Image (spheres, grey):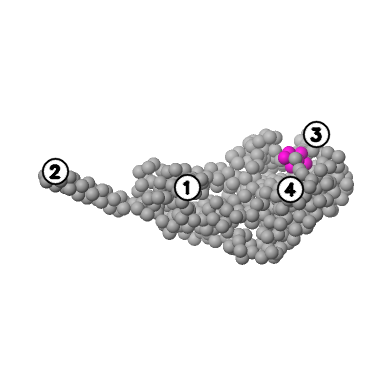
Amino acid sequence: MKLGKIIGVVVLCVGALLCGAFLTLVSIRRPWITPVPGVRLTPERSLVVLSELGPDSAFRLLVKAADFSGIKAKLTPDVGDRIRTQAWSEVTFSNVVVMIEEAQTNLALFARAVAAEDLRAPLPPDFRWAGYPDFRGTHHIEILLTASALRRASAGDCAAALEDVKMLMRGGTAIGFCDGPAGLYRQTSYCQAGCTALRRMARREPIAQPALREALAFLDAFEQELIPWPESVRMGHAWVTRMLPAIYKMSDEQLLQEVERYHVFLRRFAPLMGSNPETTQESMDALYSHAVAIAERPYTQGAYGSLAAATTCSPWELLISADPFGRVLAQLALSSFEYEHSQHTVLRAELGLTRLCLAVSLHRAQHGAPPATAAVLTPEFLAAIPVDPFHAPDALRYVLGSNGTWLAYSVGRDGADDGGQADAGGDGPDIAVSSESDLLRGAAYY
């Protein structure tokens, strides 16, 4: 009997200690992040349930355009890079020419998608995007429109080539809205291809001045059509909001396919630790309010570092967080922000450099030589010198060489002016285009 009483007392004492520890833990828990007041989280373009999109919506038309299953001609894996870097030749790219002819229906559907009135984007069906249409076929459209533009330009029809480029870049923006997490990548890829094609057209002799002037006007307007980085962040918040309930409902086995084992452990004990769909949603709202606030400021390398640091914590800090599971999910949500922000800013720099390149080509065509300074280009060819998005409000740099060559560049991610030094095959330090090549240097895209 004595032993039984002793065991009972020990159990009661241990239970009381655990209960006291739990109550103490609850009392010292605090939110690990607080929201930024006044920040808008709702995207300008509404995100809807997939079933709400009709057959004439941009999304549904893009899905059909991306279906190349009935096309017999095939593209080699490296054809996209070769089209951008090699001179156009009907012989070298004969398979591309054949596919352009076979894919007229796809290209027509793509054109309808770009012109569609319903530009709404769909929310993900669930955490794993199961059942979401496959947009990988749109990569073929990017290659075909790029090839068509270069083919027409090589034949001297720069006006028709420009129409291909317009379709290419506007289509990239449409896909950017519709293709979920891959949208930013596809927008960047399409726009980069379009800019490269325009710079190649600007190097042609004789220069097609009317087409280049129209291209300059198009690029001025297109920068306003581009999905702003803050809007991309807001769309990410909408996707996360959609997926959170599903994350809490997933089985351990399903969740393990997406996250680490300790995430599953945290989710299992989430209710005891203060995490549930509502508290995690509050955490995500606060997190994305900071992310949007950063996105709305001029680019600074490492800007998301302090926000990422707030999600990184010791086991004890995680334990006393009001929403520990939400804090772990925030680490996953933030993992690509810095990189994607950088890539978006590179794209804006390339758009500005392409405008500068076209203006320099027009000046040379009309005045017999490149301008001595960028200021000479205004207002005849440019209303203003494009701003360097990596060093706003400063303008992009332009340097005329002693032998008539020229260089235009952005200071790049680090914000330091390295005189236009740019790696032809990778990142930085600056991002440049020149009279010697139509390729962008110093920017390693995706």
Say whether marks 2 and 3 touch (CB < 8 Å): no
Task: Provide the residue designation for mark 1.
Answer: 253
Q: Which amino acid is tagged 1?
A: Glu
CA distance separating discs 2 and 1:
43 Å
Q: Nearer the viewer, mark 4 or mark 2?
A: 2
Q: Which amino acid is tagged 3?
A: Asn
Seen at 64% across and 42% down, the residue is 446
Q: Which amino acid is tagged 4?
A: His
- The range drawn in magenta is 77-83
CA distance separating discs 4 and 3:
40 Å
Per the rendering, the mark at residue 288 is: none
339 vs 106: above or below = above
Per the rendering, the mark at residue 403 is: 3
Say whether marks 4 and 3 touch (CB < 8 Å): no
Q: Which amino acid is tagged 2?
A: Leu
Give whichever of 378, 135 is nearer the camera.
Answer: 135
Q: How many marks?
A: 4
Magenta-span inclusion, residue 176: no
CA distance separating discs 1 and 3:
66 Å
Q: Where in the figure is residue 435, as x and y percent of width and height?
A: 78, 39
Seen at 84% across and 53% down, the residue is 159
Compared across the picture, whether 123 is left or right of 263 comes to: right
Seen at 81% across and 43% down, the residue is 95
